[in-house]
Every structure is written in structure tokens, then in C-alpha cells.
Amino acid sequence: MRAVAAGITDVGLQRDHNEDCFAILREHALYIVADGMGGHRAGDVASRLATEAIVDFFRSAVGEDFTWPFHFDSRLSDEENRLLTGIRIANRQIIERSARSRECHGMGTTIVGALFNEKAGKMYIGHVGDSRAYRLRDGKIQQMTRDHSLLNDYLQAMPELTEEQRSELPKNVITRALGMQEHVLVDLQGDDVRPGDVYVLCSDGLSGMIDDSEILEVVQSTPDLEEVCRRLVALANEHGGEDNITALVVRIEPDAEDIAVPEALSSRNPLWMRDANGPRSEAAPEAPANVVKQG
């Protein structure tokens, strides 16, 4: 099996800049979505810093003489340790930057990362915050991550709440994020994959605007992954586009030797997003390795 992926990020309809960020690192089958927060546009600094830190770690964590910057947990797989360590490094760098810069003080970001291991036939997922990972299989969609949010904590503690009571609960308040504290708690899991599985990583600008059933319908009806991403973003904007919107879609396909791999998909360069003063929305093209962020 092999993984193919596409991603898109969009500022939405009600924000003046984009604090979301994503990366696709093909040589490691690594996929990341981050949703930054903070004043003075520091949120885009946090999401970019986190994404770059994880990508840089994966590129450096090779060879037998590699020294792990954090304790290697023997209870976890190598892939889970790499995801965990990359996220911890990102958290540390955000805290250090926040301490050095008044403009960046208090910044943070969510993170959701997926790492595909072809030999093991597994997708490893790590996340902090309310950016989500979904798996679509056999005509069904399953949320693989649990939102680290005040709203979700309330709903889990008090499932008997009425719809009216639920509508009064605070929204968009997260209980975990990178940059909040020195020791970050990361949720990790490994999922056995099958050919045809599709994983969707997204910021809450997507999951908060459209239903899971709409995500399922778009993926099932659209074979081209870039078009899937565009349609998901368009739907979120049709429903109001209240936040920045990022969708990263990964599809598991049969063995690579059975399929001709386009040159763009076999490149060792990651896909990054940035548009500064350019288009409001853009799918991930090949770009210089030091470019990560749209916004």
C-alpha cells in the first residue's frame, strides 16, 4: 500500500488573515495540520513554527547515531515516539519564542499529525487541541481524535444536557494546545489501514462549519483529492466561513509497483502553503522548503 495526499487552506469569509498551516512530507508519509491562536498575528507564527519544527525533526531523525531530544518511550512504537517527540519539540520552540518576543507572548496552536507506515500497514495519529482526524471506510466516517475543548469536556461529563443547554456552553475554548504549558499531553493512536481508506485532517474551521456526513459525501463523490479539498473548503464557506479552513486528505492505495507514480507525487520536497498577499485560497503546490504558511 501507499499513501497519496493533497491539502488546501483558506482564510475563510470572516477573518483578515490565515493562522492555519499544513505540511505534506512525502518522503516520510507525514501529514500535519495546525491552527494557531494569539494576538498581533502571533497565531500564524505559532502554527508555522510548529509545522516547521516537526518537519525538521523528521528530516534529522535518521541514522543509528541519532540522539533523541526527549526520552524514548519503549511502550510506544518508533512511529509514535517520532510523532510524540516532534510535537514536544514544537511545543518547546513555541514557548521559547513566546518568552523572547512581546508580539508572540501567549501564542499557541493546535496540532494533528498522521504518519503512515507502509510495512506495518498502520496510520499513526497524534494530536493536541481541536484539529481533527477522520477515517472514511466502507461508506462510513469515524472521528479518530477527541476534541480537547471545554465544550467537549462538558458534553462528556454531562451527556444528559438538552440541546438548549448545549447551545449555551462556551465554544471555541480549547483545553490543550502547544504553547500552553511546558509539558504537553499528546493523544496517540495507531490505526490498521486498508486500501481505499481515506483520512481527513482538518482545522475546526472545517469541522465546525459542516457535518461529518457532508465530508463523507464529498469524499465518496470526488475521486480527485485536490478537488475533494476544494469542495470541502467551498462547503465550509457556503455555511458561513467563520474561521480559517484547512483540509488535508490522505488516501491509501494498492501497492506502489502496481501504479505509476506522477513525478510531483514522488518528489522528496514537502508541500507547503503560503500566500501572503496572494490568492485567498490555494491548493498545495511544490514550493521552497522554507515556506510553510498561508496568511
Image: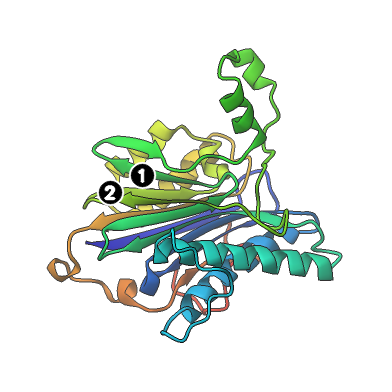
Horizontal placement of 290 versus 45: left or right? left
Q: Give me the residue at 38% from left, 79% from top.
A: 268
Q: Secondary structure at mark 1?
A: strand
The amino acid marked with disc number 2 is Asp
Q: Quadrant of residue 63?
A: bottom left
What kind of element bears circle 2?
loop
* Residue corresponding to mark 2: 197
Q: Is residue 93 above or below residue 124?
A: below
Q: Disc 1 vs disc 2: Cβ atoms closer than 8 Å?
A: yes
Residue 48 seen in render: no
**Residue type at numbered disc 1:** Arg
Please give the name of the residue rendered at 49% of the width and 63% of the height, measured from the top-left corner: 73
Q: Is residue 265 left or right of residue 59?
A: left
User: Is residue 103 placed above or below 147 in the rendered structure?
Assistant: below
Task: Measure how far apart labels 1 and 2 are at the Cα level.
Answer: 7 Å
Q: Which mark is residue 135?
A: 1
Residue extending farthest to the left is 258
Could you tell me residue 243's position as x and y percent?
63, 44
Residue 245 in view: yes
Left or right position of 132 against 280: left
Q: Is residue 164 left or right of residue 289?
A: right
The image position of residue 126, as x and y in percent, is 49, 54
Q: Position of residue 205 (x, y in %)?
A: 57, 43
